Every structure is written in C-alpha cells, then in structure tokens.
Amino acid sequence: MLNVGIIGCGKIAEVRHAPEYLENPSCNIVGFFDEIPARAESYAEKFGGKAFNTIQELLNSGVDAVSVCTSNTTHAEISIQALNAGVHVLCEKPMATTLEDCQKMVEAAERNGKFLMIGQNQRLAKAHVKARKLIESGEIGKILTFRTTFGHPGPENWTGQKNSWFFDKTKAAFGAMADLGVHKTDLIHFLTGDVITEVTAQLGTLDKKYPDGTPISVDDNAYCIYQTRGGIIGTLHVSWTFYGDEDNSTVLYGTDGVIRCYDDPKYSLIVEKRDGGRAYYILDQMTSNKEQTSGARTNTGVIDTFVNCILTNTPPAISGREVMKAMKVIFAAEESAQNGKKVTVVQD
C-alpha cells in the first residue's frame, strides 16, 4: 500500500488528484496541507486522512509520495523539499517558473533516488497514444506540419474564482502559454518523437480583466510557430478566451496522409489517407473543464501511472528531465514574444 499526501487544496486536487488516489486500490491518502488550514480540513473530511499544519509535518508522516498542486511559483521549492525528504513527487504543470528551478528539481530527484513526474496528462489520452503508434508505424509517412490548439473560457470557470491566482503574475508567472501551451508542446514532442528547437511567438492579453476592469497581468492568448530539429513546422494556439465549446485538438499532416486527434465530436481519432482511404476510431473524448466542474469526471490516468511507476520501480516517461524539453520551449516563447524575434532552443 502506497501512502500519499496532497499539498495544495485547489480545484485540481479536488477533481483529479484526490479522487484518483481514492479510486486506486494501492493507495492510502494520509492527508493534506494547504496554506489555508480550513481547506485542508475540508478535503480531509471529504477524502480521508488528516489536515497537517505544515508541509514538513506531512512529509514526516510516513508518506511515500505527494502531489504538488500549489500555485506555479511554489512548485520548485515544495517539490525539492519533498524529494530531499525522500518522497516521490507528482508535480502539476507547469513544472517551474525558471529553467534553473526546473534543473534543480531534476537534480534533487536524481540525487535522492526518487521519481519526479509532471502531470502532462495529454500523453496518456487514448487517441494520442494510438496516434503515436500509427506515426511510428509510418501510417501517414513523414510528418511535415502540424497544428495544435487548446482553448477554453479561462481558469476562473475552472476554479470558480473571478480573481483567480492564475491571473496574478506574482503567483502564476505565466498565463495561457504555460498553463495550456506546455501540454500541447510536450504532446508534439511525444507524437513526433522529435524536439522543438525554434520558436516564434506572440503573447497577448486580449480580453481577461480583474474585477476592477483592468487587464490581467498575464497572457490570455498565445500563438506560436514551432520548428523541430527534424524540420517539422507547425503552429500552436492556446487561449483562455474560447467562450463556446472547448477545443483540445491536434492535427498532423504527413506525406501519406493526415491524423486528426480530438477535432470530431464522435471520433477521437481519424486517419485520412492520401489515396482516399479513411479510418475512424472511437477511443475516448477529452473531458472539458466545464464538464469536470459540473461533476462529470473521467480518470486522467496520471495518478495510476505515477503509482504504478513507484510500485514497479519504473522511471516515469513523463519525468522532470523529459518535461524540461517542453519547458525550454515555453521559456523561449516568452522570450520571443518579448523581443519580437525567433528564438533557438538548445535541446539535449
């Protein structure tokens, strides 16, 4: 039995981490910590375990692993504290707010012999797993281009807070580019088996405002042109201003056909062949933020994957070191937008 704790009692802990630990028969929730004690107490009442007064008390309680579900700027400090205490860490995205902190997290994991996994759940979606296998088998030939999109009405609809910490640069550091863009950036690495090495980006605050009417201090839209080491060129658009249906689609264009992921309401994956052939797959559908906040929930697979890695002593594929590749691209996009120039990304 794996003893686990959750640090940070926000929406992501409520609708994903805590329920998925609870559903996993190999897990025991020891307890919660939050900077607002009443929130930790309410989560302990709902999911089991106890509320701890400090992070260190939770880490000293016999936990084998923790989820770090706090605001972005605290990810590195808390994750490193846990790793140094000999505890495995599942950290929410974005991994950290500087490349230096990302590196420190990876080093702490490796120094202490513990796993650091980042919650990049798009790699685990069934259509994406199938698409990768099809691409590896040569189903659509050589990948030439792609477009990937992730847009929804914004984090305030997810958190239920109009003045969400996601809008506060001192706590979030980034806006939509890192919140949503890191998912799709990591996904492109996963699907293509390549890495992004050139970025041209524009980030903007187009609509989101604080309750007093002033614009939020982070971006609510981001547009990028990516080029991979292997020469694939594609576009990314992420947004907090899609005030209709959520869009979480990715399309890859190859020399022999096209693969469409999550851009059809019925078929989660469609293969269009150059010779006119078609294949349609009903695998799963992405659960939107709106659906999750209304009570509809599907298992993301993140917790089960993390737990299985620990129990079988198998390093996670979505490790801190692997996700650093996507984080380098996020930082490059921020730099490109600030300076109005293409930025080269140095990848391992």
Image (cartoon, rainbow, N blue to C red):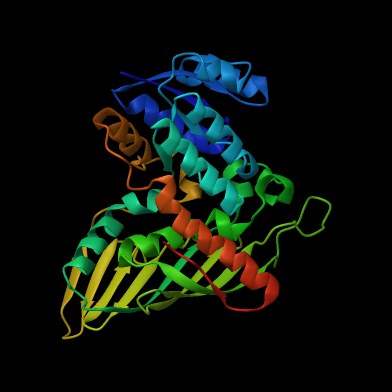
Q: Quadrant of residue 232?
A: bottom left
Q: Is residue 301 above or below residue 286?
A: above
**Residue toward you, 191 or 96:** 96
Residue 308 left/right relative to 83: left
Tell which of 35 and 11 is nearer to you. Answer: 35
Location of residue 140 with respect to 136 vertically, above or below: below
User: Seen from this angle, which residue lies furthest front?
Assistant: 111
Q: Is residue 135 left or right of residue 216?
A: left
Q: Please identify the quarter of the rendering in which residue 201 is found.
A: bottom right
Quarter of the image where one finds residue 22:
top left
The answer, for residue 294, to whether it is visible in the render is: no
Q: Residue at x 64, y 55 (%)?
A: 174
Q: Is residue 95 above or below residue 24?
A: below
**Residue positioned most to the bottom:** 275
Q: Residue at x 20, y 66 (%)?
A: 136
Residue 45 appearing in the image: yes
Residue 190, position as x, y percentages in the image: 34, 60
Q: Image check: 183 left or right of 263?
A: right
Please state the horizontal and vertical placement of residue 291, each as a whole percent of the image: 46, 46
- Return the residue nearer the eye: 124 or 261: 124
Count every numbered label the image shows and give the total.
0
Give the vertical position of 208 relative to 121 (above or below): below
Q: Which quadrant of the figure contains the C terminus?
A: bottom left
Q: Tell me: 139 left or right of 320.
A: left
Quarter occupied by the N terminus:
top left
Q: Position of residue 161 (x, y in %)?
A: 67, 42
Residue drawn at (32%, 47%) of the image: 317
Q: Residue at x 61, y 44 (%)?
A: 72
Percent of width and height locating residue 76:
57, 40
